[in-house]
Amino acid sequence: MSTTTRPDFAEAGAKVGNFRWVIVALLFTAMVINYVDRQTIGLLKGELSQEFGWSENDYADLVFWFQASYAVAYLAFGRIVDRIGARWGFGIAFLIWQVAHIAHAGARGLTGFIFARVALGVGEGGGFPGGIKAVAEWFPKKERAFATGIFNAGTNIGAIVTPLVIPAITLAWGWQMAFIVTGLVGLVWLPIWLIVYRRPREHSKVTAAELAHIESDPPDPVEKIAWRRLLTVKETWAYAIGKFLIDPIWWMFLFWLPDFLGKRHGLDLKTFGPPLIAIYLLSDVGSVGGGWLSSRFMKMGWSINAARKTTMLICALCAVPVAFAAFASNLWVAVLIIGLATAAHQGFSANLYTLPSDVFPRAAVGSVVGIGGMVGAIGGMAMAKYAGYVLDQIGTYTPIFVVAGSAYLLALLVVHLLSPRMEPAKI
């Protein structure tokens, strides 16, 4: 059937198709690759610090400049994907970050790595705006948190794959090959994405019933929405400040967790694997579970507001114990506490990520996600400097984990005060 003649409605009793989940699978795979690229530097921190003589503040600078470029790119790509669509917006971002990842192999000294990290940040800044835009195009509101949770779970699989793959490649062929091999393998994804992805109405694999399901929400306004208008809307800041508070916690886990396990529990490149795998497996449960739970509440008749915020409250409470993680003398107790916190982050994040598509028209989703991602990355820059200072001056992770344990309750409070009912934004 031609996409131009496809009806706008499904026949009564027609079975809804599932091709939209193929799109989620592609986004999931891209996030796996994204996090292998992003986390490689954290796994190699000890090796690279020893080879190049980096201090804690030098390493913090690497994270800082990555997040600075990520912040700017996140904002820019939010607008780009709204204008050119998820297919090409996400594809361009993927190509940039994958080439930048490979370029790390040729870096020499701190300055060379900073340039490579800046380029990586430029590309990876387009990942989530593109992914959220794709979910907004392919899913009705009642399924978006679950779909977002599934593709966001790819970040955890990437974080699991990294400690399995990077040490093995590094020990066999050196750290340069760790960047080259994973970069070249990851590039295989790009042509598949460009071949498969189209908007639902343009896709021959989408049945009339599935299209009707995807388009079951009331139609959005078609007018273009300027950034300056979005910046005056309180729901934009509910999302952005929420990201400012919680994103730095995830960055901290990603870039400093191997270092914490090494300093507190004596692990190294050969022994990081099992604890990190356990932590990020728990994260996967939180990512999918958090999205599933709010969707389940909505199927029970709860409002979007009640479903999202109740789920976020449960997640925020689960993050509190991480404040005491540095006091755990047993490795696996520490792993359980941190794993619960990372699961809580992913569940909270899956629901926060849906806020733009819940309250803004599709034409503004990418831009709002971009604004929030930029503000979240600025928070990550501040966390990088804070972590470097604390570790250089105090030498303990306790103050860092205390911040991590309190951030989610504060973020939920901000979201509730600025968007008390999660009603459509007035723009």
Image: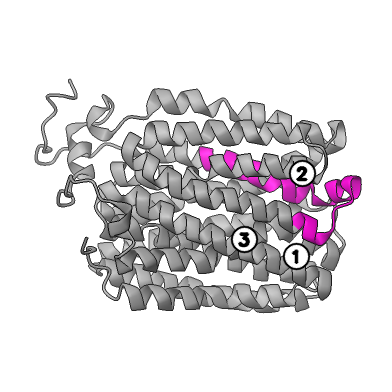
Report the mark closest to the observer, 2 or 3. 2
Image location of residue 183, percent across then percent down: 66, 31
**Residue ID at (53%, 52%):** 71
CB under 8 Å between discs 3 and 1: no
Q: Say whether residue 341 is left or right of residue 221.
A: right
The three-letter amino acid code for the residue at tag 1 is Gly
Q: What residue sits right under mark 3 in the picture?
A: 381
Displayed quadrant of residue 178 = top right
112 vs 132: above or below: above
Q: Say whether residue 25 is left or right of residue 202.
A: right
The three-letter amino acid code for the residue at tag 2 is Thr
Image location of residue 136, percent across then percent down: 31, 47
CB under 8 Å between discs 2 and 3: no
Query: Residue 71 versus residue 416: which sits nearer the camera?
Result: 71
> Which quadrant of the rendered structure holds the N terminus?
top left
Q: What's the CA distance linking mark 2 and mark 3? A: 18 Å
> Callout 3 environment at 10 Å: few (<14), some (14 to 19), or many (20+)?
many
Give the magenta part as a residue range. Answer: 30-59
**Residue ID at (67%, 73%):** 401
Which numbered marker is on residue 111?
Answer: 2
Which numbered marker is on residue 388?
Answer: 1
Q: What's the CA distance linking mark 3 and mark 1? A: 11 Å
